[in-house]
Amino acid sequence: MLLLTSVYELLWLVTTLTLRCTAQTVSVTIPFSAPSSAPAISRSLVSFSIEQDRWVDWIGKGTSNTFFANVLNNLKALSGEPTRIRIGADSEDHTNFDPAVQASQSLYSEDIFPAISTTVPYPEATNITVGGAYYHLASLLPSGTQVIWGVNFGQANLTAAFLETQAISKAFTSSAVKSAGITLAAIEIGNEADLYANNGARTSGWNLQKWETFASNVTATANRILKTKVPIIGAAFASSSHSTSGFSPQAIIQNGILNSTGGSQIKIISQHHYSGSFCSGDNGVLQDLMTKATIRSNLTQYSSDITAVKQQSLEYILGETNSYSCHGAPGVSNTAGAALWGLDYSLFASQIGISRLHFHEGIGYKYNFIQPITLTRSILDGSTLSTPLLPHVQPLYYAAIIAAEAIGPSGKTTAVELIVSNAQVSGYAFFVNKILARAVFINLNAFTGTTARKSVHLALDLIGSGGPTHMTVKRLSIPTANSTSGLTWGGQTYETADGKVKGSLSTQTVPISQGVVIHDTEAVMLCF
Ligand SMILES: *[C@@H]1O[C@H](CO)[C@@H](O)[C@H](O)[C@H]1NC(C)=O
Ligand SMILES: *[C@@H]1O[C@H](CO)[C@@H](O)[C@H](O)[C@H]1NC(C)=O
Ligand SMILES: *[C@@H]1O[C@H](CO)[C@@H](O)[C@H](O)[C@H]1NC(C)=O
Ligand SMILES: *[C@@H]1O[C@H](CO)[C@@H](O)[C@H](O)[C@H]1NC(C)=O
Ligand SMILES: *[C@@H]1O[C@H](CO)[C@@H](O)[C@H](O)[C@H]1NC(C)=O
Ligand SMILES: *[C@@H]1O[C@H](CO)[C@@H](O)[C@H](O)[C@H]1NC(C)=O
């Protein structure tokens, strides 16, 4: 006799019997105890990088931008650690310091913007001049936030880098920033210096001696004010030669930069990476981004770099990353499909020695997780909007939420990728104190709405004694891969006016022996 313990099981049975004809079944083995090889996974794995020309718009002009604060606090509440924030990027090399730019005039920075275009509806400022108060605004970040700030190396103006370093150091030793619990995790000296020869930031290109001169001045200046040795971000290159010549971590090590006065304070090597580019206006195809194999190959191309960095006992991060460079591709970077890409990309990165990913964000960029202010023109083509768009989250924000929830606040979480014999379904198991706590599965098949939605039945084999018999299933529900809104996570939405979660939580508790069905363009989290 069949004994059904809940209405969900009945529903499950009906669904499974109907699906059995169509759904492929894939067996997945999940260890109940963490394998000894399981890497630790950072609570701030998914972090942010903010284009600093409009930092003031993100954080708020002297009083907190509550939408931005709320969406950051959602993540902090789930993982117990605020996302780390890197502030800088391209505009860090276009920023100068002028003490006359005063907060008393509500002017934290003065920006000069180029004309907008359909390809670049929200361009970066070409000239940014900041005063000391600009850096003090860090006090408005969630308590406990660790900040990386960039200083200008691109314009070869040592005085600019010196004045910025001095202002940053003074801000992080001010009582306002200290009492808010905000710390300076590192200083970055220049953004993507490997491109200087091409992008006009500096005609003579990268010069090693010059970087060491800057690093020596920046570290001496910061160390004196902060009364401690500030960590320096090394590399921050746009690409890597993966060899000891050209631009790469290997070249930095080979050239002895780590042995130089300032370079000895390099504690983190940062790589920048985008999976594609929208710089020439080529949209790309969403399913290409959502491909399990290329998500892996985009990251494993750095494996030899990561090994070289770890051999020096340094940390390796993606200090700036996102889907398509030049602010994202319309209909790809701003969609729900990109959220599944971002989740799989981040979790896979944790498996190959990347300790953190700073997803790049700018006001009005297509690939944002968060649009923190009201927008009056389209992020897709710059056309004037008939109705302004209030602050809101974009689909990728759910990737940050799910990663934070799966990792959890223990500070002792390890994770392994699970072997899923399906070209488009990936899976990860999360262990707390070495015991299985959660698993996440992601189905990367792009559901377009034109044909019936397919699914895969994952038959779960939990190995190891003393394991649980039931699990709770939570789903990221997505209308179609190219949807830009309408996602729900366990029935709840973050697409709200204040950025706080809304709606009642909906999960299902089922026997593990039943496995789980995962539809095309869906993510599920299992809690054991
Ligand atoms: C912007 O900065 C550059 C130096 O980087 C300078 O040559 C130019 O005059 C500045 N433009 C304006 C409008 O201030
Ligand atoms: C750094 O450079 C500035 C500007 O050239 C100079 O005034 C300052 O003395 C330098 N500091 C150190 C520690 O080299
Ligand atoms: C370098 O920066 C200093 C300090 O802001 C500024 O006064 C000076 O004009 C800059 N030099 C050049 C060549 O841009
Ligand atoms: C840097 O210093 C370390 C330790 O002293 C040494 O082993 C290494 O060979 C040096 N690297 C270079 C490129 O000089
Ligand atoms: C990265 O992913 C894109 C698709 O998003 C693909 O076209 C590209 O070939 C991949 N690059 C590598 C190095 O795997
Ligand atoms: C998604 O794609 C479909 C089919 O190409 C199209 O009709 C629809 O407008 C797209 N939706 C969005 C939000 O771009």
Image (cartoon, rainbow, N blue to C red):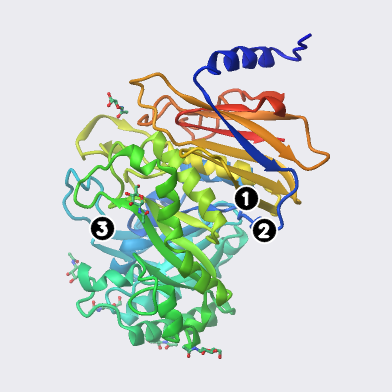
Q: Amino acid at mark 1?
A: Val
**Label 2 amino acid?**
Ser
Task: Tell which of 202 and 391 is nearer to you.
Answer: 202
For this rendering, which residue is in front, 498 or 11? 11
**Is label 2 in contact with label 1 (beta carbons under 8 Å)?**
yes
Separation (CA) of disc 2 from disc 3: 46 Å
Q: Which residue is mark 2?
A: 37
Dot 3: few (<14), some (14–19), or many (≥20) neighbours within 10 Å? many
Residue at x-position 64% and y-position 34%: 526
The answer to whether any part of residue 133 appears in the image is no
Task: Indicate the secondary structure of the residue bearing disc 1.
Answer: strand
Q: Position of residue 258 (x, y in %)?
A: 49, 83
Would you identify the image quadrant in which residue 401 lies?
top right
- N-term-proximal mark, 1 vs 3: 3
Left or right of residue 26: residue 204: left
The quarter of the rendering in which ligand 2 is drawn is bottom left
Q: Which residue is mark 1?
A: 416
Q: Secondary structure at mark 2?
A: loop
Query: Which residue appears at 36% of the width and 68% of the height?
Result: 240
Image disc number at residue 125:
3
Residue 436 can be seen in this image: yes
Instruction: Assess whether mark 3 and mark 2 are in contact (beta carbons under 8 angstroms).
Output: no
The kind of residue tagged 3 is: Ala
